Amino acid sequence: MKRIFLLMLAILLVGLPAFAQKDENNRIRNAGKVMVEVLHVPDDIPKDILGKAECVIVLPSVMKFAIGFGGSYGRGAMTCRGAKDFSGHWSAPSMMALEGGSFGLQLGGQATDFVLLVMN
């Protein structure tokens, strides 16, 4: 019995990193699609403002749902500029999550893409 438990635990521990890696790759891919879409909209983020941003956070498909009590949940990626004065190359992405709750007179649901610029 103990061997079976240890074997199941080993299989679980080996499989979890592979699943997490696939999830992160999908998150980065979706964040990239959202950023490309935002930059190709006629009223997109002005280039001078994007040029001053130290970091960019992209949260694709943040879900919000409420029936009296509500919540929001989304996952995305963040990348920041390198160098001393934040004028260098963009860094590797780091994973971000957005969560929240609310209550009051509300009913409905929506999915929204967020692009947040961190200026300083």
Image: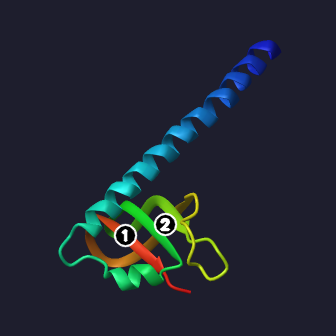
Q: Position of residue 12 (x, y in %)?
A: 66, 27
Q: Kindly report the distance in space between the C-alpha atoms of the residues bearing marks 1 and 2.
A: 10 Å
- The residue at 56%/78% (across/down) is 87
Instruction: Please name the residue that numbered disc 1 is placed on.
Output: 114
Please, what is the three-letter code of the amino acid marked with disc 2? Answer: Leu
Residue at the spot 62% in from the left edge and 34% down from the top edge: 16
In which quadrant of the rendered image does the C terminus lie? bottom right
Q: Position of residue 85 (x, y in %)?
A: 62, 83
| Element at label 2 | strand
- Residue at 31%, 82% (x, y): give it: 46
Q: Secondary structure at mark 1?
A: strand
Residue with the most extreme right position: 2
Query: In which quadrant of the rendered view does residue 20 lie?
Result: top right
In which quarter of the view is residue 84 placed? bottom right
Is residue 32 positioned above or below 14 on the image?
Answer: below
Q: Position of residue 25 (x, y in %)?
A: 48, 44
> Mark 1 packing: few (<14 Cα in 10 Å), some, or many (20+)?
some
**Residue appearing at x 43%, y 62% in the figure:** 73
Please report contact status of discs 1 and 2: CB closer than 8 Å, yes or no: yes
Residue 109 in view, yes or no: no
**Mark 1 belongs to which amino acid?**
Phe
Q: Is residue 21 left or right of residue 47?
A: right
Q: How many marks?
A: 2
Q: Nearer the viewer, mark 1 or mark 2?
A: 1
Q: Which mark is residue 98?
A: 2
In the picture, which quadrant includes the N terminus?
Answer: top right
Query: Residue lying furthest left in this view?
Result: 42
